[in-house]
């Protein structure tokens, strides 16, 4: 197994069979939550104005800029808000636009099959990768406004702590760094994460609680290359 980690999506990213994208706070956590409440598919866009243009009666717009819900969107990029309104989402299509995660997801999907991972669906993602005998993975952390995000590197480390026990042929330097963070207490990551502190100041403690609830959901958001159509555990 070849495992490369990238702390930011604007790094020089090599070719891999699969990409795992992480935006723990909150895009990939939101994607897992959306699929868990029964949405039919998730499309990710970077430009939120394009999302508004694509909206129809069976589509919800979900997203944020600088952690605040986008004007004219239906819901924010908030797992707690989605769970609170879970009954509204059954069979709906979602267009998701976020500050950081959208860029990373679109970058990955232009290069290969893409999986959205977070702490809340960690075990499900790992089990999927192992069951499919996937042997070449690029793990892309979304970061926060161009800066490395502690919580994303920590989540990458948690994934690597399991996958690195498989038959490993190569880990890059970023993977070794992330591995060394894998056993940090969740409370310590929450305490020192800049983005977590920002969300706390905005009164979004419920999202923090959900996003750090490891293995809460058994869903794997995944899309074929260049399709940008995320469903759960599709056959590829």
Image (cartoon, rainbow, N blue to C red):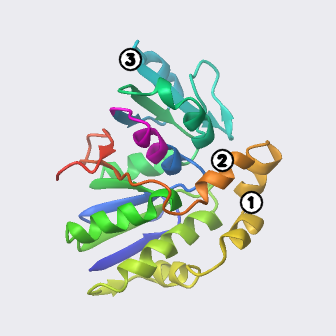
**CA–CA distance between discs 3 and 2?**
26 Å
Q: Which residue is mark 3?
A: 58
Q: Is residue 207 visible?
A: yes
N-terminal label among 3 and 1: 3
Query: What stretch of residues is rendered in magenta?
Result: 31-40
**CA–CA distance between discs 3 and 1?**
36 Å
- Residue 3 — which label? none
Would residue 93 appear left or right of 66 to someone viewing this image?
Answer: left
Q: At which x and y percent is residue 226?
A: 26, 43
Q: Which residue is mark 1?
A: 194
Q: Which of the two discs, 3 and 1, sits closer to the camera?
A: 3
Write the residue at 66% across / 70% down: 186
Circles 2 and 1 in contact, beta carbons < 8 Å = no
Element type at marker 2? helix
Q: Residue furthest left?
A: 236
- Label 1 Cα crowd, 10 Å radius (few <14 / some 14-19 / many 20+): some
Would residue 131 appear left or right of 220 to someone viewing this image?
Answer: left
Q: Dividing the picture into quarters, in which one does residue 5 lie?
A: bottom left
Q: Dividing the picture into quarters, in which one does residue 130 lie?
A: bottom left
Q: Nearer the viewer, residue 153 or 162?
A: 162
Element type at marker 1? helix
Q: Dividing the picture into quarters, in which one does residue 40 lie?
A: top left
Q: Which residue is mark 2?
A: 207
Write the residue at 23% across / 74% down: 135
- Label 3 Cα crowd, 10 Å radius (few <14 / some 14-19 / many 20+): few
Q: Is residue 178 above or below residue 147?
A: below
Residue 199 counted in the magenta span: no
């Amino acid at each position: 197994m070849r495992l490369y980690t990238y702390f930011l999506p604007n790094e020089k990213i090599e070719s891999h069979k699969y990409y795992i994208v992480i935006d723990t706070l909150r895009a990939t956590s939101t994607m897992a939550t959306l699929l868990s409440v029964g949405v039919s598919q998730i499309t990710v866009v970077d430009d939120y104005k394009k999302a508004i243009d694509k909206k129809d009666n069976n589509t919800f717009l979900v997203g944020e800029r600088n952690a605040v819900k986008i004007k004219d969107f239906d819901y924010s990029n908030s797992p707690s808000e989605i769970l609170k309104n879970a009954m509204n989402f059954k069979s709906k299509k979602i267009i998701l636009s976020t500050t950081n995660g959208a860029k990373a997801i679109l970058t990955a999907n232009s290069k290969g099959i893409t999986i959205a991972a977070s702490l809340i669906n960690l075990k499900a993602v790992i089990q999927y990768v192992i069951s499919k005998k996937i042997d070449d993975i690029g793990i892309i952390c979304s970061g926060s406004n161009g800066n490395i995000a502690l919580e994303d590197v920590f989540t990458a480390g948690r994934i690597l702590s399991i996958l690195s026990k498989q038959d490993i042929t190569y880990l890059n330097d970023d993977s070794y760094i992330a591995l060394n963070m894998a056993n940090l207490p969740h409370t310590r990551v929450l305490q020192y994460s800049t983005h977590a502190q920002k969300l706390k100041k905005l009164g979004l403690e419920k999202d923090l609680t959900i996003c750090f609830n490891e293995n809460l959901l058994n869903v794997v958001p995944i899309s074929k290359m260049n399709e940008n159509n995320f469903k759960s555990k599709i056959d590829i």
